[in-house]
């Protein structure tokens, strides 16, 4: 009986595709079967058959998308009864597709339901997607916790390269994010994670929505030259009949001077992109999501925003975090300052405050120091600011692990080479006499440098000296003492010197330094001769 039922459904599918008008009465039975059939293969066949059938109905203009009022305006006749009936069947089919995407069916059927629904939404109007239906679909895909990842993944990977879908998806993201801001006290972490995944999968600029001929691609069938409806010369016979039918019903405007759709405008796309990101960044973000965003923003968000300086508040707040997140946020500010005209006079003050000994133990310390090197690469930094960073790095080298001290020496070398006026720091022997540290930062007798000052301008570093370098010459790790010798050269002669490669120091670790020391050949081996044999390790009264 089951086999007979399956064969009957397959037969109905074939007949409906072959003779859609004569076999239209198969539709209710197939709709009922699509929601109840257990075979995934058969379910997929039914969905695709009904999708193709209703697409043909839309092409013939038999489904009126503006509402029941249009149908009620017709005179009583068999056509009116048929149109009302076919519209009900179509609404039922779309509801089945929406429910099936979040059901317990296999992922193949769910992805197939999404594909059929998207095909129908793109066919409902000429040159314009059904916005209400698409917004409803976006809302389900974003907020439904039972929505499978395969369905979302298919949606993000296949449809966001179309300009119209990109635009309307960004609008819905902005609306959902604004809605979440008003829902205080509710846990929205799952929805925020979904919004982030969607945002980073959307092409940053319209270049990702261009077709083979360099024209915008649209899902709704609009002309690729950017008008709201395709010109009649580019229409097929079926599309021309469909357009004529919709003009007669008043669904579309046949005015040849009609302005392009809003999603065709680059400024509108930039505004939607900016609105979506700014609304999302106002949400309570986890540290993991914040870290990913700060890595993504500089190259993928800032260049494509309507006004990149609108990100300043978000980046300034993120800079309050310690470690890598703070310096990543500072990197965003750096890009806004150097490329987009942002005035931020406290940039180096904030960077100066981030340099603390704990940064040598960060998980992502390599990226942290590479960004710091980028910020200090300019030779136009004021001398007092450069001197403050040199002294701060010198103090940090005293407390840092060996590989951290090597990093500090590399930075000091490069800063002295970039700023010849700071050379006075290594030519003040009268101020190089250290005394035992009085606190964690090591207050030094006769050293005018203020290590606890937050502002580089108030540290008086340019009046101090680099006595810390002399201390490192006697470091317990021989590699550190050897590294200090690079400062013995005359760094003011740039032609005879080159900048130190900080990546070598950043790649060092306790393990690499130990291995290097073990493998090193020792030319002179120290020997100790005892006149009497050693009988114990410690003296008798050692305790």
Image (cartoon, grey):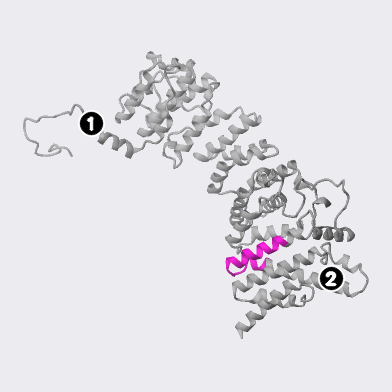
Badge 2: residue crowd in 10 Å (few <14, some 14–19, many ≥20): some
Which secondary structure dominates the residues rendered in magenta?
Answer: helix
Evaluate whether residue 395 shows in this view: no
105 and 324: which is toward the camera: 105
Residue positioned most to the left? 532
Looking at the picture, how far across and down is residue 207, in whole percent? 66, 43
Looking at the picture, how far across and down is residue 23, in whole percent? 76, 76
Q: Quadrant of residue 236?
A: bottom right
Instruction: Please give the residue where the numbered disc 2 appears in the rendered image.
Output: 83
> Residue drawn at (35%, 33%), measured in percent from left and top?
402
Image position of 392 with respect to 124: above or below: above
Residue 436 horizontal side relative to residue 44, left or right: left
> Residue drawn at (58%, 65%), measured in percent from left and top?
107
Q: Quadrant of the C terminus?
A: top left
Instruction: Please give the residue where the numbered disc 1 appears in the rendered image.
Output: 521
Q: Quadrant of the N terminus?
A: bottom right
Q: Secondary structure at mark 2?
A: helix
Q: How many marks?
A: 2
459 and 283: which is toward the camera: 283
Magenta region, residue range: 98-119
Cα distance between the residues tagged 2 and 1 = 93 Å
> Residue drawn at (83%, 67%), measured in percent from left and top?
62
Image position of 113 with respect to 128: above or below: below
| Disc 2 and disc 1 in contact, CB within 8 angstroms | no
Residue 365 horizontal side relative to residue 215, left or right: left
């Amino acid at each position: 009986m089951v086999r007979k039922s399956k064969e009957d459904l397959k037969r109905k599918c074939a007949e409906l595709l072959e003779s859609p008008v004569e076999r239209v009465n198969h539709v209710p039975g197939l709709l009922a079967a699509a929601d109840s059939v257990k075979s995934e293969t058969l379910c997929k066949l039914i969905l695709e058959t009904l999708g193709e059938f209703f697409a043909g109905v839309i092409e013939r203009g038999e489904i009126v998308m503006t509402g029941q009022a249009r149908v009620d305006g017709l005179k009583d006749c068999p056509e009116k009864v048929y149109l009302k009936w076919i519209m009900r069947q179509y609404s039922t089919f779309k509801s089945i597709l929406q429910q099936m995407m979040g059901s317990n069916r296999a992922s193949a059927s769910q992805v197939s339901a999404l594909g059929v629904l998207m095909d129908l939404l793109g066919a409902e109007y000429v040159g314009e997607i059904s916005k209400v239906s698409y917004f409803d679909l976006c809302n389900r895909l974003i907020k439904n916790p039972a929505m499978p990842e395969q369905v979302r993944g298919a949606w993000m990977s296949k449809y966001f390269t179309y300009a119209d879908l990109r635009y309307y998806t960004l609008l819905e993201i902005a609306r959902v994010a604004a809605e979440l801001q008003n829902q205080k006290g509710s846990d929205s972490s799952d929805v925020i994670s979904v919004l982030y995944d969607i945002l980073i999968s959307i092409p940053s600029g319209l270049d990702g929505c261009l077709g083979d001929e360099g024209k915008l691609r649209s899902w709704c069938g609009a002309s690729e030259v950017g008008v709201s409806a395709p010109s009649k010369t580019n229409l097929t016979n079926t599309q021309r009949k469909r357009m004529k039918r919709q003009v007669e019903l008043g669904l579309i405007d046949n005015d040849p001077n009609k302005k392009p759709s809003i999603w065709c405008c680059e400024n509108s796309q930039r505004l939607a992109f900016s609105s979506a990101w700014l609304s999302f960044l106002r949400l309570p973000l986890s540290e993991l999501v914040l870290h990913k965003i700060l890595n993504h923003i500089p190259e993928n968000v800032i260049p494509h925003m309507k006004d990149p300086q609108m990100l300043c508040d978000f980046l300034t707040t993120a800079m309050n975090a310690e470690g890598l997140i703070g310096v990543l946020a500072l990197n965003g500010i750096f890009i806004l300052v150097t490329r987009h005209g942002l005035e931020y006079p406290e940039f180096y003050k904030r960077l100066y405050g981030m340099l603390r000994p704990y940064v040598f133990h960060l998980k992502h310390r390599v990226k942290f120091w590479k960004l710091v090197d980028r910020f200090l690469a300019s030779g136009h930094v004021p001398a007092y600011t450069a001197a403050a960073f040199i002294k701060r790095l010198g103090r940090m080298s005293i407390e840092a692990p060996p590989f951290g001290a090597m990093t500090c020496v590399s930075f000091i070398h490069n800063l002295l080479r970039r700023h010849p006026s700071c050379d006075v720091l290594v030519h003040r022997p009268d101020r190089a006499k250290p005394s035992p540290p009085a606190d964690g930062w090591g207050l030094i007798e006769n050293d005018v440098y203020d290590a606890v000052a937050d502002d580089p301008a108030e540290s008086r570093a340019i009046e101090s000296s680099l006595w810390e370098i002399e201390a490192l010459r006697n470091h317990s790790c021989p590699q550190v003492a050897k590294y200090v010798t690079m400062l013995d050269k005359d760094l003011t002669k740039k032609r005879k010197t080159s900048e130190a490669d900080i990546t070598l120091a950043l790649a060092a670790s306790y393990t690499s330094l130990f291995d290097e020391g073990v493998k090193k050949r020792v030319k002179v081996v120290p020997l100790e001769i005892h006149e009497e044999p050693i009988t114990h390790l410690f003296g008798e009264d050692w305790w």
